[in-house]
Amino acid sequence: MKKTVLLVLALLLVLSGQAFAADTIKLGFVIPLTGDIPKVGEASKFAAEMLREEINGKGGLDVGGKKYKLEFVFEDNEAKPESAVNAMLKVIERDQVLAVVGPQSSKQAVPAGGVANDNETPMISPWSTNPDTTKGRPWVFRAAFLDPFQAPVVANFATKQFKAKKAAVLFDISNDYSKGLAEFFKAEWEKMHGAGSVVGMESHGTKDQDFSAQLTKVVAAKPDFIFLPENYNIVALIVKQARDLGYKGPFMGSDARGSAELMDLCGKECVGQYFSTHYAAAGATGATKEFIDKYNNKYGYIPDDVAALTWDATRLVLQAIQSVGKVDSDTRKMRKAVRDAMVNIKSFDGITGKMSFDENRDPIKCAVVVKISEKGEFTFAESVCPK
């Protein structure tokens, strides 16, 4: 009798779980909650949670006239490629998510994208700019512009702003993003200014903290500016060490610099510098300002580009789910329906700008160059759009 009661209770729990699951849409987020860039993971999670709470507070996501509660599963990729692969497998196989947002950095997004594609699960990277993330992977999407577009933005702006003819580059050899963008920039710069106009092309490892050897060579080459396609935490170290070695010229950065934590780490050394990115928080209007104000009121700081891109990427997935018109209980069928719906999104008005998508599921959108003000704010300097 006792065994029968326990069996009935267990069956009821299973059935109730299925009923709850039937009214729930589950998405995975593979993000760096620990490791070298935890602020990226924090901003991603905060933006996603704010969106989930907003939608669930209205009863859920409306799909075909029925409301579905959103459940978000956050898995830490530790800012490591191998951890990103494992985290992706967990949310796909263990958690049976419908789609995955992330990873953010190309270093994790490139290998994790292969896992998502092999397992036929829609994945959208909010922040990855390396072409290999989506290349040849019909199940992988992104919300950020690509490095072949970002590199000319940097090269043209630096030429104009600094009247530069000679450039130097310092990059992380083991980071797909940093290495790839460095190479795209070198090719673009030499196309504009001739062979040999990149007078220093120095690399380092991900765990390096001392860049004096590389910077000594760079400073000796007397570049007109130094390009740093580096994560924000490394930028702070490099800039300070370069100044200690006597370099007085300008730096320019890329979108991985745009973390809310940059100024805490770099301080006055980064004031006045420029970098290319996805949106400028200072002076924003409309839906972008609404997002910024809500985020700032809730979490106590201005959201960076990765937060804004996570918001846009998640909304893209949710829009695709809504356009399917119904939620199929067969996860594999529903994943394919969502993937097909994402392919059919031809344009999207995001808080990081209006975007359309090409045949590789990459967005065609504008880039922004920002200047770091005396207050440490990322202020708008220039917008550059694809021709």
Image: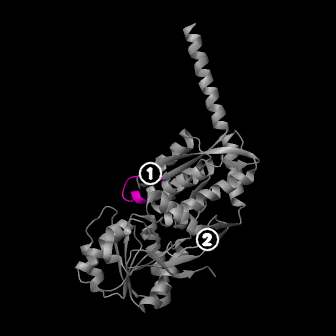
Q: Residue furthest front?
A: 297
Residue at the spot of label 2: 286
Q: Position of residue 338 (x, y in %)?
A: 69, 52
The answer to which of 4 and 376 lies nearer the viewer is: 376
**Above or below: residue 305 compared with residue 340:** below
Counting other residues with Cα less than 10 Å from the Cα at mark 1, is it few (<14), some (14-19), or many (20 or more)? many
Amino acid type indicated by mark 2: Gly
Q: Residue furthest top?
A: 1
Magenta region:
31-39
**Tag 1's secondary structure?**
loop
**Tag 2's secondary structure?**
helix
Looking at the rendering, in which quadrant would you find the N terminus?
Answer: top right
Amino acid type indicated by mark 1: Asn
The answer to which of 304 and 228 lies nearer the viewer is: 304
Asked whether residue 182 appears in the rendered view, the answer is yes
> Who's the residue at 47% across and 90% down the image?
160
Which numbered dot is residue 77?
1
Asked whether residue 194 appears in the rendered view, the answer is no
Q: Position of residue 221 (x, y in %)?
A: 30, 86
